[in-house]
Amino acid sequence: QVQLVESGGGLVQAGGSLRLSCAASGRTFGSYAMGWFRQAPGKERDFVAAITSGDTEIYADSVKGRFTISRDNAKNTVTLQMNSLKPEDTAVYSCAAASLLSRVPSLYKIWGQGTQVTVSS
């Protein structure tokens, strides 16, 4: 089974950029759709972006045009490039794996531990 480990979170000023990475172990990485989700304190987990093994991408409206998801199946990694960050982007960001491309968190069965992103105003 795939295991996921995120990295790249941190503190950034509004308007800045961060690049999150998710490293996957396991030989079946290429068979999964990969997603990024975020959860702010006291709020539900929200969909951010997802990508299939064939590089079909979907995004939440709130990040479209600012965030870019990509994957490297040879390196077992998925990346979330975040530009023009806003204070409302502050959350714990988690990557997850699912059998199908989806915006629904419950369809993702494998999750990383998450990485904190804080955007100051």
Image (spheres, rainbow, N blue to C red):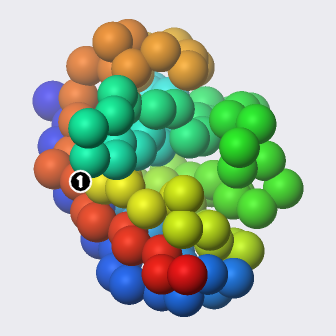
Please name whichever residue, 85 or 9, is drawn nearer the observer in this view of the structure.
Answer: 85
Image quarter for residue 37?
Answer: top left
Image quarter for residue 10?
Answer: bottom left
Q: Secondary structure at mark 1?
A: loop
The residue identified by callout 1 is 114
Pointer 1 local density, CA inside 10 Å: few below 14, some 14–19, many at least 20: many
Residue sitting at x 39%, y 73%: 118
User: Is 3 situated above or below 11?
Assistant: above
User: Is 111 situated above or below 108?
Assistant: below
Left or right of residue 54, residue 2 in this image:
left
Residue sitting at x 40%, y 44%: 38
User: Is 23 situated above or below 38?
Assistant: below
Left or right of residue 90, residue 79 in this image:
right
Residue 29 position, x and y percent, is 37, 39
For residue 4, say whether it is visible: no
Residue 119 position, x and y percent, is 48, 75
Residue 25 position, x and y percent, is 21, 50
Task: Kindly identify the amino acid type of the residue bearing the numbered disc 1.
Answer: Gly
